[in-house]
Image (cartoon, grey):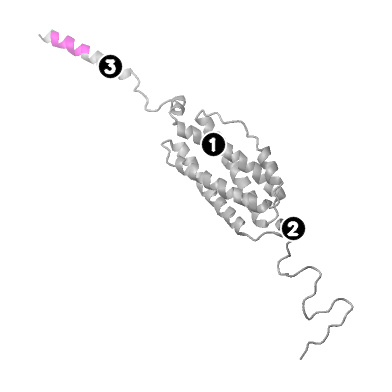
Amino acid sequence: MQIHATVMGLVVASFVAVHAQQPAPSSKEPSSQRASTLSPADREFITQAATDGQKEIALAQLAEQKGVSPSVKALAERIHKDHMQADQELKTLAQSKSVALPAAGDHKAEIAKLEKDAHFDHTYASLMVTDHKKAIALFERASNSKDADVKMFADKTLPALREHLKLAQEATSMKTSTTDRPSGSSPAGTSGTPGTAKPGTAKPGEQSSPSPK
């Protein structure tokens, strides 16, 4: 009986030793598997944000050249700078998640239409209000993502988008610039038909008649 117990003890000890040498399963998944778990909504967010961002950069470059009012120029410069930075961060995010970004969109038609607009400043600012309301909604949804990297990017970008919206709304409330005024309108602070003298004033070369007492 003692010999049998000794043999059994040796068998158990050998079994424990063999399993102790086997590496414990890793709790971390390979990066390829982590990328494959990205939800369809997150993938759509990344591609949509990239497309929209390229459009904002193209329109901002136009507004930097063609804008007249200081508020519109400042808005365009801020949008250009912030979206360029976000675009680089988004490319890094997409690469880490194995998401293929769409090719740079062709915004020539939209740029040409805006460039010919007689009220460029107001039209551009109004367009930025509309675009950034949509962008904020898109990024707010992404900020609830279960993917930590997607959520971090959305949370980081949202403050800049909200600031862009605020600046665009302020730009649309500005008075129409002199170059953006419809033809035929009188400059601010003047009234009446051009070339007519106000009552009590004399035309060039004439003396004004005394006012009746």
Disc with the residue nearer the chain's start (1 vs 3): 3
CA gap between label 2 and label 3 equals: 93 Å
Q: Which residue is mark 1?
A: 48
From the viewer's perspective, is 123 left or right of 197? Answer: left
Residue drawn at 47 percent across, 37 percent down: 150
* 103 lies above or below 21: below
Please check the rendered image and state whether residue 43 is part of the magenta-colored stretch, yes or no. Answer: no
Provide the residue span drawn in magenta: 4-11
Earlier sequence position, callout 1 versus callout 2: 1
Q: Position of residue 182 (x, y in %)?
A: 71, 57
**Residue at (70, 42) in percent of width and height:** 112
Left or right of 34 in this view: 67: right
Whichever of labels 2 and 3 marks the residue nearer the N terminus, that label is 3
Residue 45 coordinates in the image, percent (x, y): 50, 36
Give me the disc on residue 17: 3
| Callout 3 crowding tier (Cα within 10 Å): few <14, some 14–19, many ≥20 | few
Q: Nearer the viewer, residue 2 or 88?
A: 88
- Dot 1, how many residues are within 10 Å of its Cα: few (below 14), some (14-19), or many (20+)? some
Secondary structure of the magenta portion, mostly?
A: helix
Of all residues, the one furthest to the front in this rendering is 212
Residue 4: quadrant of the picture? top left
Say which amino acid is labelled 3: Ala
Closer to the observer: label 1 or label 3?
Answer: 1
The residues bearing labels 1 and 3 have C-alpha atoms spaced at a distance of 55 Å
Q: Secondary structure at mark 2?
A: loop
- Residue 189, percent from left and from top: 71, 69
